[in-house]
Image (cartoon, helix red, strand yellow):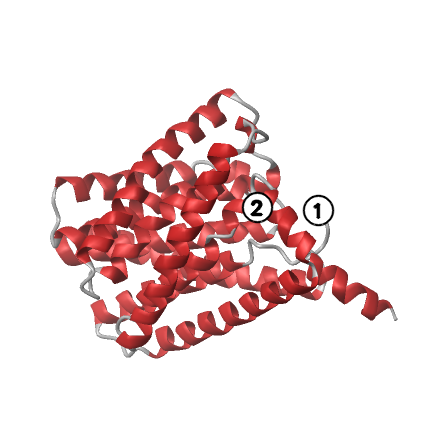
Amino acid sequence: MEVVQTVPARLANFPVSFPSVVMGLAGLTIATQRVESLFGIASVASTALLWLSVAVFAVITATYLRKLVVHREACIREFNDPVRISFFPAFSIAFLLLAIAFLQVHEPTSLALWVVGTVLHLVMTLVVLTIWVQQQRFQIQHMSPVWFLPVVGNILVPIAGVPHGQMDVSWFFFSVGLVFWTILQVIFFYRIFFHHPLPQKLLPTFFILLAPPAVGFIAYVRLNGALDNVALVLYHFALFLFLFLLAQVGMLRRVRFFLSWWAYSFPVAALAIASLLMYHESGGEFFRVVALVVYALLVALIATLTVLTVRSIARREICVED
């Protein structure tokens, strides 16, 4: 009888932030593909990671759809929450990342995922921006790096869009993401300099700051076809942010495990991929070392997050009421 009562309650508390797990796994998949390609390694590991990412995404999506049907009010509360609303576009971002991962595996599947992810992300961008503009409840202390997901996630579109021949669409989304990244970054640093610090649960989302310049570098090189000064600025700013975030380890290591720890994963994956691309385009040995060090850190990070997440699920510490 206890199980019958507990399972629905856990489903009602299934967090909309769960797709961040897929973002991390897909990021590791893409980084592994780049490492295998660069060093001529058979694509066994990346293939396994790709199908693991697809399976996890399918389970998470099916579970949240079930929550939407059974506990619609709980989903509406998440959508009206000033922080949780920004996690909804993580679903469309997961589609876009899987589209990138499928590029060298099966191009038609990649194109289908890209179309779904692009359309869905445009809708989510317009919906969330409209809510931000029209609402009167959000305060500056509600702002966190999670707010980058709805609009800055547009920068991902060109990475698969350019290989699929969609240049105009790719420039459109890249422009939206890049401009809003600048705006939101200014707002976030104002918030963190002059207002209350982030709640402990959201401290890992600091690492989201790393994703826009790293992903922006990759997308810009795709669009431009070569390195130039703009690309160099984006990459080196990402590298600086990585050093800045490493300097915050003393603060971050005191945070107990939350699902928000997965916010560490995709930004680190983005920097690893950007560094591999930088090495490929420039041939600089320094970037090869950076890429391998960051990739090794990424592997260790994903392994740790996976163990902690599985353990928390087994202990029923996830999908509980805040």
Contact, mark 1 vs mark 2 (Cβ under 8 Å): no
Residue 123, which numbered label?
Answer: none
- Is residue 126 positioned above or below 156 on the image? above
Q: Position of residue 310 (x, y in %)?
A: 62, 65
Going by the image, does 177 lie left or right of 37? Answer: right
Q: How far apart are the alpha carbons under marks 1 and 2?
A: 12 Å
Specify few, some or many for label 2: CA neighbours under 10 Å numbering under 14, 14-19, or 20 or more.
Answer: some
Question: Which mark is in front, 1 or 2?
Answer: 2
x 50%, y 45%: residue:
86
Relative depth, front residue between 224 and 308: 224
Residue 84, which numbered label?
Answer: 2
Relative depth, front residue between 283 and 159: 159
Residue 322, which numbered label?
Answer: 1
What secondary structure is marked by label 2? helix
Relative depth, front residue between 183 and 123: 123
Going by the image, does 171 lie left or right of 88? Answer: left
* Amino acid of disc 2: Arg
Q: Position of residue 285 (x, y in %)?
A: 17, 53
